[in-house]
């Protein structure tokens, strides 16, 4: 099954759980697919969302449907030149599902999305699990991490150029992430910390000395 097929299947299952009509489900699926399928995307695609949804299946969320909804929408708006993508994605979610999902539940999903902007501990169980799911790619074996790093780089380079990317990636992401006491918030994901630090340091060395390669 392709990532697109898996994404569609996951969305339809969630839409059914939310009691959305088949017509609305298909309309929203088309909008989500258009967002995640934009030609400039290399990492923030349906594949990333499906990976998060697969990981979510084994976690003890208090509100699994809202966690899944947040995951599905959290990167639907993604413009490397802007800093408000998460807020815009949350706003889109609330606009599309207003009056269809109870406001307190919908606000919970939107809050999870906005929390992915800073990736700081929230004190909310479901939010912290989603944040760690989103960052779990950092703790994967180097070849998997490398594909992620190259994908994100490919999303930014056309907009800011190579030199700005290298400087920004290190100063705005790698160094602050390494400076954390714990990269991951929840006990479920903390075992990934050692591999994540190794990957981040290796990427930093690559950025300083040449290209990001195997």
Image: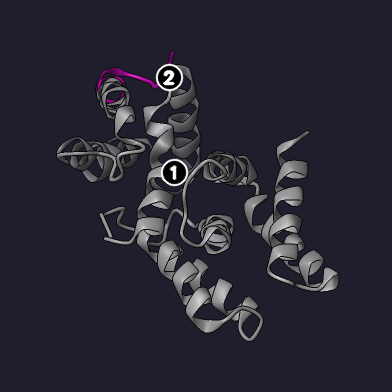
* Quadrant of residue 180 within the rendered picture: top left
Q: Which residue is under mark 2?
A: 141
Q: Residues within 10 Å of mark 1 (few under 14, many from 20)?
A: many
Residue 51 horizontal/vertical position (percent)? 57, 39
Q: What label does residue 47 carry, if any? A: none
Badge 1 element: helix
User: What residue is at 42 percent from the left and 25 percent from the top?
Assistant: 140
Residue 207 included in the magenta stretch of the image: yes
Closest to the observer: 194 or 28?
A: 194
Total marks in image: 2
> How is the structure coloured here?
one colour
Residue 77 appears in the figure: no
Q: Which residue is under mark 1?
A: 133
- The segment highlighted magenta reads 205-214
Residue 16 horizontal/vertical position (percent)? 75, 64
Residue contact at pointers 2 and 1, CB within 8 angstroms: no
Q: Is residue 82 left or right of residue 198?
A: right
User: What residue is at 25 percent from the left and 39 percent from the top?
Assistant: 183
Location of the N terminus (image quadrant): top right
Residue 211 horizontal/vertical position (percent)? 38, 20
Mark 2 or 1, nearer chain start: 1
User: What residue is at 81 percent from the left and 73 percent from the top?
Assistant: 21
Residue 170 appears in the figure: yes
């Amino acid at each position: 099954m392709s990532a697109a097929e898996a994404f569609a299947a996951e969305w339809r299952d969630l839409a059914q759980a939310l009691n959305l009509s088949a017509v609305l489900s298909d309309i929203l699926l088309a909008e989500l697919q258009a967002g995640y399928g934009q030609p400039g995307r290399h990492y923030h695609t349906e594949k990333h969302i499906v990976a998060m949804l697969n990981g979510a299946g084994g976690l003890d969320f208090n509100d699994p449907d809202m966690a899944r909804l947040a995951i599905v929408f959290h990167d639907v708006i993604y413009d490397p030149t802007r800093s408000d993508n998460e807020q815009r994605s949350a706003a889109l979610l609330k606009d599309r599902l207003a009056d269809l999902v109870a406001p307190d539940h919908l606000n919970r999903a939107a809050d999870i999305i906005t929390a992915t902007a800073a990736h700081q501990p929230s004190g909310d169980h479901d939010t912290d699990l989603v944040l760690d799911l989103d960052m779990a790619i950092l703790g994967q074996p180097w070849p998997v991490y490398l594909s992620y790093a190259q994908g994100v780089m490919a999303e930014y380079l056309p907009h800011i150029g190579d030199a700005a990317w290298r400087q920004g990636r290190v100063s705005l992401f790698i160094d602050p992430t390494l400076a954390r006491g714990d990269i991951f918030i929840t006990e479920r994901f903390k075992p990934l910390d050692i591999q994540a630090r190794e990957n981040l340091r290796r990427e930093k060395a690559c950025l300083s000395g040449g290209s990001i390669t195997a």
